[in-house]
Image: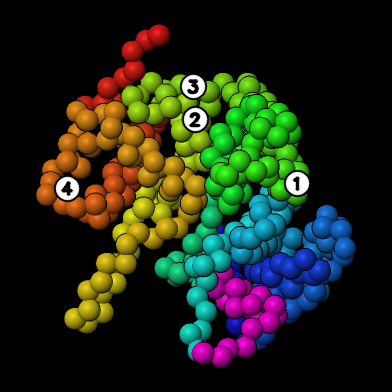
Amino acid sequence: MQSAQRLNGISRLDVSLELAKKAWKVAVTDGQRLNPSVVRVDAPDMWVRLQQLLQLLAGFLAKWALPADTQIVIIYEAGQDGFWIARALQAKGVQVHVVDAASVPVPRHARRAKTDRLDALRLLEELRAWLRGERRELRMLYIPSEEDEERRLLTRERGLLQKEMTQHVDRARKLLALHGCTEEIDGGFAQRLAGGEVRRADGRPLPEELVQWLLREDERLKLAHRHFAGVEKTLMHQLPEPVQRCIAVLSQLCGVGWVGATRIVLELFWRDFSNRRQVGACVGLVPQPYSSGDSQTDQGISKQGNRRVRALLIEMAWMWLRYQPQSALAQWFARRTSGSGKRGRRIAIVAVARRLAIALWRLLKEGVLPEGAQLKRAA
């Protein structure tokens, strides 16, 4: 029998959750049992299911006669359930870790047994190894507060509405192109369409079925426009004063608009970073080498973390080169890509994006302006 495991001198109960829509598999051990216990909680209501989990853990504490100050440590994989479970458990004094599912090691056999029970047991083993200090494998995620998550929804809704408007316009243009029509999709398109002014390339009227489809597309487009305008009108007013100040600081830089500044603050700089390496790793713009024997391969960037931030930083890097040509970052890019083709520039822009993220972080944290950067003229 193993000795009782302890965390900071306190008895510890390790728990892993395998989340599913119908039920959760719960693997529990206190380090003294030969095999962990695996049970199922399946209340239809999610909040009731969470209370059922807490009652289950209290039952294990009583059954195994563990001290009252036993620390409960729970781990589960990040997924569609988000972070509400972690925040609810933290409010009860439980230590919670949310792990990036892609970082959990799995066997590489062509055929391997996979069940919720086995997954819960494997995750429990990885948690115990992580708590012992073996932290090369698992990548724990930072748990945001409810306020930080709610603010991110503002820019994400704006982005989805913008994408939706583009999709409606493109779909209408492609439908018209099937009949050789190049009509402009604008505010008066529906009126011209209903009046029969929009015709095929040979002058014949469009099919009635197509006309009705295009009218419905125009209605959805106008609705998306109204929602988009409403979101833009109220977005800044819904943000707290410290966040607005951060956005204002970044917006002063040439090449950084208020939309990009808002998105980067809400999606990335809502959390604190200790050093520049954490910033680069968080956005997934760090290199991933592959070296084995004589084989030396560059796998590109890790692409871990928030993909929205990664795409945004690439866009901001191109704009930085355009509007900040005298900055040290833009001059480094020019020297690096001198004589290179398009592929070389596309590779180097990733490094620019990573360095730009670090420069913006330093500007907000320490007030250090990026070297050679120009500010916008006062209106």
Q: Which mark is residue 259?
A: 2
Query: Horizontally, is 197 left or right of 363 in the view?
Result: right
**Is 118 in the magenta?**
yes
Amino acid marked by disc 3: Arg
Magenta residues, dominant SS class: helix
Q: Quadrant of residue 227?
A: top right
Residue to which mark 1 is pinned: 208
**Marks 2 and 1: CB-CB under 8 Å?**
no
Q: Quadrant of residue 99?
A: bottom right
Q: Of callouts 2 and 3, which one flags the residue occurring earlier in the amino acid sequence?
A: 3
Q: Of callouts 2 and 4, which one flags the residue occurring earlier in the amino acid sequence?
A: 2
Q: Of callouts 2 and 1, which one flags the residue occurring earlier in the amino acid sequence?
A: 1
Amino acid marked by disc 2: Val
Residue reaching furthest top? Answer: 379
**Marks 1 and 3: CB-CB under 8 Å?**
no
Check the image and report above or below for 267 versus 84.
Answer: above
Residue to which mark 3 is pinned: 245
- Residue ID at (60%, 82%): 2
**Is 247 in the magenta?**
no
User: Whole-percent x and y of residue 315?
Assistant: 39, 41
Q: Quadrant of residue 238?
A: top right
Q: Nearer the viewer, residue 248 or 363?
A: 248
Q: Tell me the element at label 4.
A: loop
Nearer the observer: mark 3 or 4; the answer is 4
Residue 350 visible, this orientation:
yes
- For the magenta stretch, what is the residue range? 110-127
Amino acid marked by disc 1: Glu
Q: Tell me the element at label 3.
A: helix
Residue to which mark 4 is pinned: 337
| Mark 1 nearby-residue class (10 Å; few <14, some 14–19, many ≥20) | few
Whole-number angstrom distance, CA of label 3 to CA of label 4? 35 Å
